[in-house]
Amino acid sequence: MPKISAEDKNLTVLNIFTTDAPEKQEGLLGAMREIVDAAAYPGWMSSTVHAGVDKPGTANFIQWRSQADLEDRYEEEEFEHRTLPLFGELTTSIRLLQNEIAYTQTKSGDGVEISPARADHTVIAVFGVEEKNQDALVDSMGPSMKFLDDVPGFVSHTVLKGIAARGLEGSFVISYSQWESKEAWDAYLAVPQDEKPAARQATERRTASLMTSVDSNTYQVVHTRAAGQ
């Protein structure tokens, strides 16, 4: 199964699609499975497909050897004239987000793994930020989140620093977190402000002062494949 590590210097891409109906989400998932199962692109390492839970949509967590390999894929005739038009018919927005892994944290101390064999409730949030504040936001969302280790149901937390994008203007940072269940995530969100630990309150204040926007959804991993499989 794919693993996420800040020591991995390959390119990580999150393709996030939104749609306006559950049946369109199923169409997206079918198209994405077909593409992933046939993938044999130079430099492609793995793809992991996520189905939207709270809102219709999908996310594809893709690992590439390099940014140059990805750009070669984008320039292919098939991508421009078949893949993008197909997704355009099923989506309300398409964001193709290139990143480097900046930070990972797990309660277990082991590496971050993503797989449909796991039952993780996955939360992906995209934070807009001014370019001058991007590194500060990464720092705010990274080591200062160690308090998560004490939160019931927390599994892992990954911070991705955006380096390029299609379908999104400006700088961005992504949070990719895993929880044991939807109930655990909802309970974390529901903690009253005056009951949050001081470290969480400080981190949330700093993050709010740096970000310019945030958009999030929750997901379930439904399919994955790596090169050579």
Image (cartoon, helix red, strand yellow):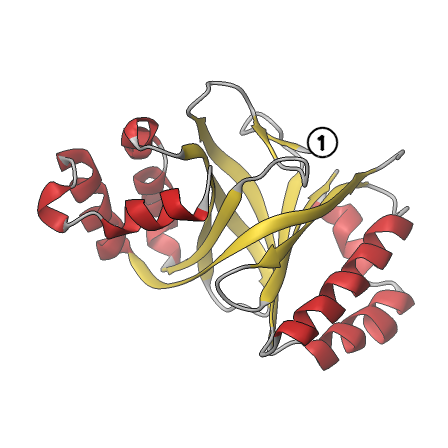
45 horizontally vs 131: left or right:
right
Residue 16 visible in the displayed image: no
Residue 82 visible in the displayed image: yes
Q: Quadrant of the C terminus?
A: top right
Query: Dot 1: within a 10 Å radius of its alpha carbon, few (fewer than 14), some, or many (20 or more) residues?
Result: few
Picture residue at 54% right of the left edge, 40% below the top:
120
- In the picture of the structure, the residue carrying the numbered disc 1 is 1
181 horizontally vs 77: left or right:
left
Residue extending farthest top: 109
Q: Quadrant of residue 82?
A: bottom right
Residue 131, image x and y in percent? 39, 56
Picture residue at 34% right of the left edge, 50% below the top:
186
Q: Nearer the viewer, residue 13 or 177?
A: 177
146 horizontally vs 121: left or right:
left
Picture residue at 51% right of the left edge, 67% below the top:
55
Residue 51, image x and y in percent? 63, 57
Picture residue at 71% right of the left edge, 31% below the top:
1
214 over 1 or under it: above or below: below
SS type, badge 1: loop
Residue 65, image x and y in percent? 75, 38
147 over 121 or under it: above or below: above
- The residue type indicated by label 1 comes to Met
Residue 136, image x and y in percent? 32, 44
Q: Nearer the viewer, residue 16 or 70?
A: 16
